Each structure stands twice: as structure tokens, then as C-alpha cells.
Image (spheres, rainbow, N blue to C red):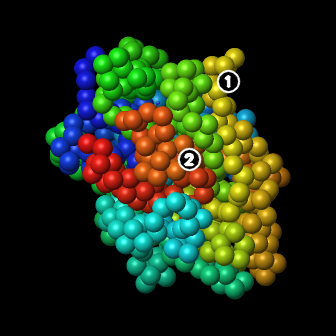
Amino acid sequence: ADGAGVVALVIGTGYGGCVAALRLAQAGVDVHMVEMGMSWDTPGPDGKIFANTTTPDQRSFWLRTRTKQPLSNFLGFPIDKAIPRCTGILDAEEFSGITVYQGRGVGGGSLVNGGMAVTPRREHFSDVLSSVNADEMYNVYYPRANAELGVGLIDPAWFDTTACYQYARVGRKHAQRSGFPFVFVPTVYDWNYMKQEAAGTVPKSALAGEILYGNNYGKKSLQKTYLPKIKATGRVTISPLHKVTSVAPAAGGGYAVTIDQINTTGDTLTTKTVTAAKVFFAAGSVGTSKLLVKLRSTGVLPNLNNEVGKGWGDNGNVMCGRANHLWDPTGPLQSSIPTAGIDNWASGGAFAEVAPLPTGIETYASFYLSITKNPNRAEFSWNAAAGKVDLSWQTAWKQTSITAAKTIFDKINAKEGTIYRTDLFGVYKIWGDHLTYHPLGGAVLNKATDNYGRLHGYAGLYVIDGALIPGNTSVNPFVTITALAERNIEKIIATDL
Ligand code: FAD
């Protein structure tokens, strides 16, 4: 609807965007959601909506001609391959010091992520969001987020016996033999569905290695939780393959939002302008930060303050593998949904998830994604010469994360008489230190915005996604992003509408 006016425009359809849209619509506000990725509701030629990790295709990556898999090598061989360029689901966005993986499509990161749905330990919350009332979060907003997202725990008895979590049981055994606290990690996977997958009575999803490029069946992404509720309100329009490029104060009040409609090879078909009374930035930590930094630096929103672009962190993500003894196989069938963790946060600054290597063959490897206490923070800045936004993160800053992860794995290796795998991230490279799955910050709460996400300098502009969180959540971030969005939108609806 070119030129038409809307009340609230939401940029992005991930966790923050879905919370904003649902609650605004329920309060009687008409909402337009704009999403640069595809809608992911139509099966491809193989009858499935999403591609498998073992056979990536044009659905798998955002505008790349070659896959860029997080694990680039296996047994010394590079595993990336050529694919047709398409607006696929996983963006491996490259900055000079880090590759930031993000979901693209209606549902944002919920489409691609591992589904690990973790609430931070309460004693760590003041390190995560120091200006937010912890009582309110733990009494109201975390429970609300967990309920809406459908978070649940694996049945421990099934965990103990099923073949598909042998890899996690090996991880537990090694953690416990070295004296580390082992925890079950809650997830948004439908556990009854996974049991049926194991029994062979339904089409397989987690047990077919589906992850990173979407899950066809059992994972409760936003497509199965917030989005159906949003559609049921009848007040929300969603425009996929539409990318917001500018938000400018409009002459008659409100904001003029410039939007490129793109095709599946990423070319712009038309450019539209929509006027909105209120605009919610929910393009993810990177998407929101890039837009705001560009708009401030190019004079479109000059009153945004100097905190915009600052406080970005990688949630301390670092990956590694360990080589097990031949008498400690991790199993050829590995559920793609991790559900086990080693919690050494308090004494070593690392929370390590036992992750799958869903190759379909015995690998004799234990693989881990660690979330670590890494205090380094980067800044986004406008590169006028190149016409793009840069990020100041340096790969060397991951050394803090490696040191923290080693508090767990050096000890386990010593106890088990094992070594690190050196073939997963290149030739003779132990640490996956070049990437993050958990970008956070860039428009930090109570700095770039007030304590509820209202951007300083412009009434009616809000940030409501991972950009608000200052770089680290001590665990996987989407439950915290969702809970904070629920808290903020409740206040905004009560006072700003
Ligand atoms: P997002 O979910 O990133 O949504 C932003 C949306 O905005 C995207 O759909 C994007 O396409 C769109 N967008 C961006 N720019 C524009 C624009 N200019 N115009 C229009 N649309 C735009 N977290 C966990 O808690 N547990 C996990 O197990 C987990 N596993 C992960 C695994 C992978 C591979 C990845 C990539 C992430 C994982 N995460 C996990 C992280 C989690 O998915 C993110 O933290 C979360 O999705 C961020 O939510 P958000 O609302 O901030 O933004």
C-alpha cells in the first residue's frame, strides 16, 4: 500500500517484532510488519519447506553462491559447496573480525536456531540487564515468555535410554567425572513429537538432522507460537521480501518509512514509502544497529544519541570439539536439538552446551557451543566511503572466551585422557572463534533508549529486540529477548498510545 498510513510499523518478524505486533494488535492497534526474508510457508520441489543440513541448497543461505557452514571442515576436508544465490534462510553476515549468523524470514532467528530456551540464573540477572527490575522479570515476564514460546524439558527417563541423545549422555558422563555441574537445557521442541520420530511413526525433523536451515516438523518456532496469534487478531499485515532502508520524520507528524521490495535473487523490484505514527525497530541486534547508525550518521535522524551503535557483544560464543576414545562412541543418530549443558559460569565464566554433530555416521567426537563471560564490546560505525556500516569486533577478543571454555575442556581432556579435535574449523584449528550465533546490543536499554526501549531524541521510535541487551545474557538469548519485549511493550501500550 504505497503512500498509505499505518499506526504502528514493525521492522522485522523475530522475537521482539512478534511480541510487539501481537500485543499492539490485541490492544486494538493496526500493525504492519515488514520482513526482508521470505515467508517460509511453501514447500520446495522436494515437498519440504526447509532444507536439511546434509544437503544444503538455495533455501539454505541468504544471497550466497557458496555455503558458509559454521563447521567448515571435517576430517581435513572443506565441506562447503556451491549453491544458487537466493534469499535463503540463514545469513552468514561477514564483518572484518566476525561472521554473525542470523535467521532471515517471517519468524527471524526462530526459524534457524537450536531451540534452546534458557532463562538466566537469577543471581546473574543484574549482570545481564542492570536497570531492569528482576522481581518483575522473574515473576511476570520470564514466565509469560516461557509459556508463549512453549518451553519444555526433556523427559529425563527418555533421555537416559534414547539412541539419539547418546552424544549428550557421553557429554554428561564426562562433565560429571570431572566434577562439573550438569544441567538439562529447556527447549521449544515438541518432545512428544521427537519420541514419535524415534519410534518411526511420524516424518523426522530433529532426528533427520534438521537445524540451521529450518525444522520442518517438531520445533515450535514463532511460526507455531506468536505468529498464528498475530494472524488471528486480524489487525496485522505482514510483508515478506520487503527491506526497510530509511525511517525519517514525516512532514505531517509520524515517520516516513522507505521500503525496498526485493525478489528472491535480492534485486529491488520497487521502492515504497509508508507513513507510520510509531515505528518499532525489531530487525535484530545487527539489523537494528545498522539502520540506526546509518540514519544518525547520514543526518536522517541526527538527534539519536552517541550510545546508538555501542555496546555490541557476541554472547561469548566459542565452539570446539573433543576426540573421544573408541570405547566412547557418541552414536550415528544425533538429535539436532541440544538439551544438555555444563554449567561452569560461576567459577570459570563458561556455560557449555553439548551440541550434536548430525552427520549420520559415528564421529567419535563431542562437540560443544560455549557461552562465555567475554567483556569485550564492539561498536558499529558508518563507513561513508563504502556506504555501509562496519563493526569494530576483533577476532583476537575471543581469547577471553577460549580461556573460559578451557576451564571446562582442559580439565575433561586431562581426566579422560583425550584431546581436542583439530579438523572442524579448518586444518589444525581447535577453536571456532570466528563466529557468533548470538549478536546482542548496539542500541542498549537505558543508554540509547530509555528504560523501556524508547529511542532518545525521537518520540514514537522504539527498539524492541536483541539490540537492547548489552552483549551477554550468560545463556542462550531468545527467552530474555522475548521477556524483555513483553515487559517493554506492556509499558509502551499503557503510557504511549
Ligand atoms: P531476529 O530474530 O534476528 O529477527 C530480526 C528479523 O528482522 C529477521 O527476520 C530479519 O530478516 C529482519 N530484518 C533485518 N533487517 C531488516 C530490514 N532492514 N528490513 C526488514 N526486515 C529486516 N538463541 C537461543 O536462545 N537459543 C538457541 O538455541 C539459539 N540457537 C541459534 C542458532 C543459530 C544458528 C542462530 C543464527 C541463532 C541462534 N540463537 C539461539 C539466537 C536467536 O535466534 C536470536 O538471539 C534471536 O532470534 C534474536 O531475536 P531478535 O528479535 O532480536 O531478532
User: Which labelled disc corresponds to residue 383?
Assistant: 1
Q: Residues within 10 Å of mark 1 (few under 14, many from 20)?
A: few
Cβ(mark 1) to ligand 1 < 8 Å?
A: no
Percent position of residue 173, x then y? 63, 82
Specify whether 24 is left or right of 413: left
Judged from the image, the secondary structure of the residue bearing numbered disc 2 is loop
Percent position of residue 380, x then y? 64, 36
Q: Nearer the viewer, residue 59 or 496?
A: 496
Specify whether 392 is left or right of 106: right
Give how far apart the Cα atoms at labels 1 and 2 are.
23 Å
Q: Nearer the viewer, residue 458 or 168?
A: 458
Percent position of residue 109, x then y? 46, 47
**Would you say residue 211 is visible in this rendering?**
no
**Would you say residue 317 is visible in this rendering?**
yes
Residue at 43 percent across and 22 percent down: it is 248
User: Which labelled disc corresponds to residue 41?
Assistant: none
Query: In this picture, is 69 found above or below 422?
Result: above
Residue at 75 percent across and 53 percent down: it is 398
Residue type at numbered disc 1: Asn
Specify whether 417 is left or right of 223: right
Query: In this picture, is 265 found above or below 485?
Result: above
Percent position of residue 392, x then y? 72, 38
Q: Quadrant of residue 13?
A: top left
Q: Residues within 10 Å of mark 2 (few under 14, many from 20)?
A: many
Q: Quadrant of residue 497?
A: top left
User: Which residue is under mark 2?
Assistant: 447
Residue type at numbered disc 2: Lys
